[in-house]
Structures are given as structure tokens and as C-alpha cells.
């Protein structure tokens, strides 16, 4: 049987991913303004045991050590996010030079270590001042994002080849403004739909602004996509699957790659969709050509029609499958289905898996974390990824989530996704068995020095 490392070309990108609010800490240092996550986490009952990102894992002060971890693992790329409130504390207006200087140091440190920086401009930490003005449901927020993107690209673009505009706009819109379980904690269906459109618009406006002074820049966006299956093959639940695939996948893929919203989803959400939301020219702006599509994949949704008249149209079905510590089904074949859907239904676009990983109940014993379950998770998903590449899907890179155990949003510090264990009291870093396994795989694949 062919070794997994031999199934990827030497030029395949191997990396790890993080995000600013989850690791940086230092939320009030060097002029950083508050973000919606600072405000949300400070409210009692919004995060596990009231955890906040005030310290996180102190990457702001320990970045050089963390870069060394990536280097020592032999990985060629590091995906991180830039905190908008560090660059523009009010979300607009004056630039905070100390915030830019931090990312300047980080980028230089990565390059000096032979690691390619892959920044994401927005990973959910909207400046609180913009939320106070209405947040993503307001069109102006998209325009302010484009200004911010241009500022960062001008400052760092001489050293950065790959830019991601947004990470998982579905989460920012629907968990933040619809379900209320993420910042800013609003439960307004119409606002969630407006936020989703303005996030799309922010991406579309930012793409040419990034490229303006850097015509060689590679620009993309990262979407969290799910395999969606009906609860059985009777046909009774097929419409439920259509609805969830529509709102979670196609509502984001179609505008970016096809320049339109899916008609069936427009009908589904018509009762909540603001009438004047989409302006002339918006969809052409959102459909700005991209150089790559980032896909984050974690699990599958299995759905059923509502159980009785008047109930919710869709119910999520729990299966008796192996699960991560987050309670998510471990479903590697779903990654293949997501990739096949994008390959089949959309124009050709290079793909990078920008997040894939799992939380498990890791234990540090005698200085080691033997997380064989995470190794199995990564290996099964990478095997499916190799199958997809063999089938013709243009996948060029893979970023494991995450480099470090970190602040996991509403779940605080309870869930550990890292390849590197962090003691949240001392902040000591200890690479897990999975880190060594993944680094070895990346080295062997990149050099083709197979045993």
C-alpha cells in the first residue's frame, strides 16, 4: 500500500493554522481597541466558566517561540489572522503603528525561519466601535473592511503572497447575529442575513484593494463547508438536506464563485430577507476573481424533516458514530463529498484545506501527550484528501487546526484542538505525538525521502 506521504506532490503546502483572538492575548496593549469578542466574553454566561481571550496563550509576547515550534515541525506555511482592532482601534480612521509593527515582526520572523506567512484579515474579531454603529448588518462595515484590508496589504504585501479576506463568514453572520452563541450575541434573523451579505461584499471590495499595489498577490476566502445527508433514503428528508446545504454551503459558494445567490435559498429565507439588501452591482463585486478557495472541514450534518406540523422545518440527527470531544461526528468521507461538490458544481479554482482538526481530551503525562486519536483523525482525513486529488480535485495545501491549544470561543479553554499542548496556568508549550507525526509526514512528502 502506498505510504500517505508519497500521495502528495513535493510542492504541496503543509501548514498549521491559528487566529488572533484565540492565541494572542494582550487585548489592551499597544493601542489595541476592544473587539466584539472582548465584549461578548466579558458578559457572564457567554463562555465556558467565563473564560476570555484576555491572555489566551500569550502569543503576542511568545510569538518567536511559536514560530520556532512551526519551524521545528518542518512545516512550510503558517496561517494566522490579523486583529483588526490592533490596526484600527475604532475600525476606521487612524492606524495604530504598534499594531502593524507586531505583524511586521511576525512576518519577518516567519520568513527568516523559512515559513510562508498566510494571513487572514478577518477571523471574527470585529472592532467593537463598528458593532456599536450596527456591525455587519450595516453596509458601511463592508466599506470599512476594504479600507483596513488596503492598509494591511500596503504595510505587509511586499513579503506576503497569499491573502485570505475572511474566515468562515457563515459563523460570523449566523452564529453571531442569528443564534447569538458567538459575538456579538444577537438573535435577529434579518440581521444575520444582512450580515452574511455584507461579509460577502466586504470580501469583494477587499480583493481589488489588496491587489492594487500588489498585482502578484494571491487572494482568496475561506468558507466552512459541510457534507449534508438526509436521515434516510426514503426521500422524506431530502428537502431538509437541500435547505441545510443551501444555507450553509451554497449561500456562500454561489455568490463568490457564480455571482448569484441560490434561488431556492432566496425562497427559503424570503420572510426574513431585507428587501433592499442587495444593491445593483453587489454580486459582480462579490464575484471578483479569486486565486484560491480555502475550505474548512470538520464534520457532516445529518438532517431530517421536522417531526410534526408547525415544528422547525429541519432537525439535526445525532448518529451513533465516533465523536470528538466537541461531540462532532468523525466523518472523513464527508471531506471527499465537500470537495467533489465544489469540483462538480463550480468553476475551476485551486483549493487549500485551511482548517481541519479535532478536539480530544488530551492528557499531559510524564511530559508527553500521546494523542493517537488525533493522529487517526488527521490520517483518515488526509487519506480522503489524497483520494480527491487523485480524482482530479485541485487541492494544493493543508493546514491543520490548530498549532496550539487555545481559546475556543464560547467553549473557552475546555476544548483542546492543538498539535501543541499548552498548560493554561504556566503557558508552557509541549508538542504532542500528533505534532511529531504531522511534521514527519510533511517532511517526508516535501522531500520524498521515504523509507
Image: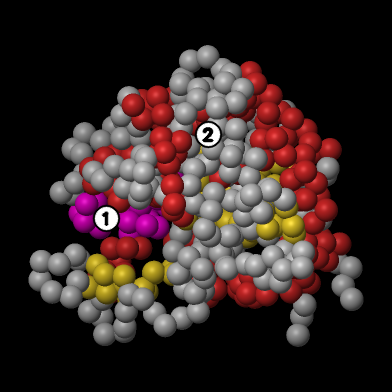
Residue interval drawn in magenta? 246-269
Front in this rendered view, residue 192 or 132: 132
Provide residue 105's location: percent of width, then percent of height.
74, 30
Question: Residue at (62%, 67%) from the top-left corner?
Answer: 362
Image x and y of residue 345, in percent: 44, 61
Q: Which corner quadrant of the image does residue 446 belong to?
A: bottom right
**Residue 405 got which mark?**
none
Quadrant of residue 444 within the rendered picture: bottom right
At x 83% / y 53%, what residue is drawn? 72
- Kindly identify the residue that appears in the image at 64 percent across and 24 percent down: 100
Main SS, magenta region, reads: helix
90 versus 312 height, above or below: above
Left or right relative to 295: residue 73: right
Q: Residue under label 1, please give it.
A: 265
Q: Is residue 268 above or below residue 193?
A: below
**Near-viewer residue (284 or 146):** 146
Separation of marks 2 and 1 at Cα, in angstroms: 26 Å
| Residue denoted by label 2 | 207
- Residue 411 placement (x, y as % from top left): 46, 55
Q: Is residue 281 above or below residue 333?
A: above
Report the side of 183 relative to 58 (left or right).
left
Amino acid at each position: 500500500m502506498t505510504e500517505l506521504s508519497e500521495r502528495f506532490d513535493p510542492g504541496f503546502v503543509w501548514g498549521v493554522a491559528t487566529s488572533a483572538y484565540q492565541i494572542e492575548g494582550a487585548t489592551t496593549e499597544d493601542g489595541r481597541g476592544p473587539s466584539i469578542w472582548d465584549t461578548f466574553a466579558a458578559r457572564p454566561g457567554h463562555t465556558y466558566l467565563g473564560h476570555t481571550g484576555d491572555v489566551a496563550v500569550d502569543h503576542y509576547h511568545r510569538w518567536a517561540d511559536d514560530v520556532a515550534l512551526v519551524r521545528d515541525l518542518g512545516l512550510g506555511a503558517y496561517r494566522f489572522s490579523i486583529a483588526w482592532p490592533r490596526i484600527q482601534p475604532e475600525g476606521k480612521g487612524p492606524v495604530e503603528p504598534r499594531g502593524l509593527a507586531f505583524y511586521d515582526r511576525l512576518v519577518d520572523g516567519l520568513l527568516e525561519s523559512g515559513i510562508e506567512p498566510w494571513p487572514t484579515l478577518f477571523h471574527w474579531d470585529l472592532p467593537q466601535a463598528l458593532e456599536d454603529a450596527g456591525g455587519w448588518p450595516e453596509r458601511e462595515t463592508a466599506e470599512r473592511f476594504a479600507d483596513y484590508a488596503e492598509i494591511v496589504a500596503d504595510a505587509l504585501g511586499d513579503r506576503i503572497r497569499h491573502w485570505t479576506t475572511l474566515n468562515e463568514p457563515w459563523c460570523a453572520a449566523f452564529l453571531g447575529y442569528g443564534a447569538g452563541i458567538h459575538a456579538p450575541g444577537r438573535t435577529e434573523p434579518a440581521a444575520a442575513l444582512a450580515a452574511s451579505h455584507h461579509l460577502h461584499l466586504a470580501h469583494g471590495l477587499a480583493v481589488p484593494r489588496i491587489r492594487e499595489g500588489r498585482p502578484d498577490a494571491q487572494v482568496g476566502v475561506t468558507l466552512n463547508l459541510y457534507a449534508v445527508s438526509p436521515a434516510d433514503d426514503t426521500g422524506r428528508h431530502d428537502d431538509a438536506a437541500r435547505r441545510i446545504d443551501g444555507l450553509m454551503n451554497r449561500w456562500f459558494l454561489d455568490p463568490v464563485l457564480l455571482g448569484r445567490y441560490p434561488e431556492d435559498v432566496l425562497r427559503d429565507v424570503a420572510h426574513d430577507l431585507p428587501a433592499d439588501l442587495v444593491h445593483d452591482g453587489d454580486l459582480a463585486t462579490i464575484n471578483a476573481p479569486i486565486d484560491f478557495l480555502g475550505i474548512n472541514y470538520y464534520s457532516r450534518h445529518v438532517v431530517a424533516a421536522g417531526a410534526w406540523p408547525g415544528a422547525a422545518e429541519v432537525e439535526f440527527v445525532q448518529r451513533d458514530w465516533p465523536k470528538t470531544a466537541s461531540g462532532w461526528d468523525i466523518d472523513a468521507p464527508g471531506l471527499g463529498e465537500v470537495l467533489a461538490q465544489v469540483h462538480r458544481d463550480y468553476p475551476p479554482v485551486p483549493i487549500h484545506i485551511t482548517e481541519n482538526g479535532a478536539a480530544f481530551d488530551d492528557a499531559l503525562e510524564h511530559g508527553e501527550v500521546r494523542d493517537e486519536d488525533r493522529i487517526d483523525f488527521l490520517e483518515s482525513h488526509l487519506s480522503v484528501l489524497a483520494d480527491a486529488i487523485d480524482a482530479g480535485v485541485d487541492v494544493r495545501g493543508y493546514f491543520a487546526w490548530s498549532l496550539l491549544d487555545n481559546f475556543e470561543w464560547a467553549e473557552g479553554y475546555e476544548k483542546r484542538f492543538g498539535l501543541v499542548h499548552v498548560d493554561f496556568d504556566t503557558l508552557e508549550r509541549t508538542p504532542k505525538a500528533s505534532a511529531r507525526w504531522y511534521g514527519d509526514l510533511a517532511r517526508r512528502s516535501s522531500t520524498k525521502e521515504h523509507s
